[in-house]
Image: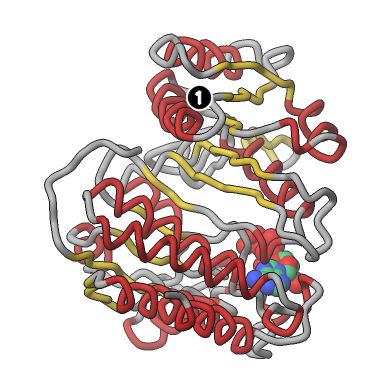
Amino acid sequence: MTQAAPMQDHLVIGILNGDDIGHEIVPASVEVARAAAEKTGLRIDWRPMPIGRTALDTHGSTFPDGTMEALSTMDGFILGPIGHRAYPKVPGAINPHPIMRKGFGLFANVRPTRAYPGLGALRDDIDLVIVRENNEGFQPDRNVVAGSGEFRPTEDVTISVRVITRAGSSKVARAAFEIARQRKKRLTVVHKNTVFKLGCGMFVEECYRVGAEFPDVVIDEVIVDTMAMRLVRDPQSFDVVVTTNMFGDILTDEAAGLVGGLGMAPGLCIGEGALAMAQATHGSAPDIAGQGIANPFAMIESTRMMVEWLGHNRGIPEALAASALMERGITEALSRPETRTGDIRGTTGTRGMTDGILAAIARAA
Ligand code: ATP
């Protein structure tokens, strides 16, 4: 996670709004990052890129040619939520998620869950990170190179294939151990090897194999159904959790529910390459799009995580300072109902919360 890389003095970051509330929360994230960057002397070259439903209208594709190539030259990008299920059934309407995650080797989806006081969290002491494997498992749109991991040999039979590899498992395990090493040095492996003896069995084996390289990190395991229960009963007992794709998908939404809902669920997608992708856990929430009420926290915090990660990865102290300033602004805004959105017991909208964060950043010494 923090391996040294050649020093550079600025960051190039792509802006991809996505769909629906993405047009509100992504610009808010850029505003906050820009304000923090200006104050800390971090130079960021922002590169807006077309994607999603608007790109279908302007470029004939939801993921225009050249976008991948352009992104591959950048340090990272902010990806707003993609509402691909509502895309019209036309040739240019594709879901860019699997292409990006696979194409950039973003195999680890780092999803923190943290309770902030007064937002209706189940407990005040929740502070955990779920590291979800991102490129294989049960997800049929990314676990094969051609076709789909789901197929229907007869009208009445459907087969869903789950792919677990040693390489994929050990890569996500290593990412999780590195995060655990920077936190409380505890890692919980979540699986169901009681039933998926081969698939989950291989995942667990690889976690222990990688764990041998991290003797300072204590490793334990929890069966996924028990984990679903324990996340509700004693979420404070977990610190860093690593799991396979589908289990991670479900558990991270559950974890978000513990601390105020999907608006409180940020994420950072990383891999072995140098590129990072800031992506909130939630979808494009078409039901509230355009109303100015979407909670921008998850997207802003995802952006902050990316700035921090790039700061470590590229050796840019100004990026670490900008991340710290963003965190301060976010925490201050969350502490008052008048600068947080309605879904987290606040009285304002996306604009008001963003302004609250910006004001706190402006006030900071
Ligand atoms: P996907 O399958 O694409 O992840 P989803 O079905 O999980 O999407 P979301 O789009 O994530 O659905 O949203 C579910 C509900 O959560 C929305 O209807 C919306 O009310 C709420 N929600 C999601 N994100 C936010 C947010 N940032 N602020 C406020 N409410 C949100």
In front: 141, or 287? 287
**Quadrant hosting ligand 1:** bottom right
Q: Nearer the viewer, residue 320 or 196?
A: 320
The quarter of the rendered structure image containing the C terminus is bottom left
The quadrant of the rendering that contains the N terminus is top left
In the image, residue 302 above or below residue 287: above
- Could you say which quadrant of the image residue 344 lies in? bottom right
> Mark 1: which secondary structure?
loop
* Whether residue 258 is situated above or below residue 295 in the rendered picture: above
Place residue 189 in its image quadrant. top right
Disc 1 under 8 Å from ligand 1? The reply is no
Q: Say how many tags the image has.
A: 1
The structure residue drawn at horizontal position 82% and vertical position 48%, both measured from the top left corner, is: 123
User: Residue at (60%, 39%) from the top-left corner?
Assistant: 130
Percent across and percent down for residue 58 are 35, 88
- Dot 1: few (<14), some (14–19), or many (≥20) neighbours within 10 Å? many
Check disc 1 and report the residue beneath it: 164
Q: Position of residue 360 (x, y in %)?
A: 53, 79
Residue 364 horizontal/vertical position (percent): 46, 76
Q: Does residue 20 appear anywhere in the picture?
A: no
Q: Quadrant of residue 332?
A: bottom right
Front one among 313 and 165: 313
Q: Which colour scheme is used?
A: secondary structure
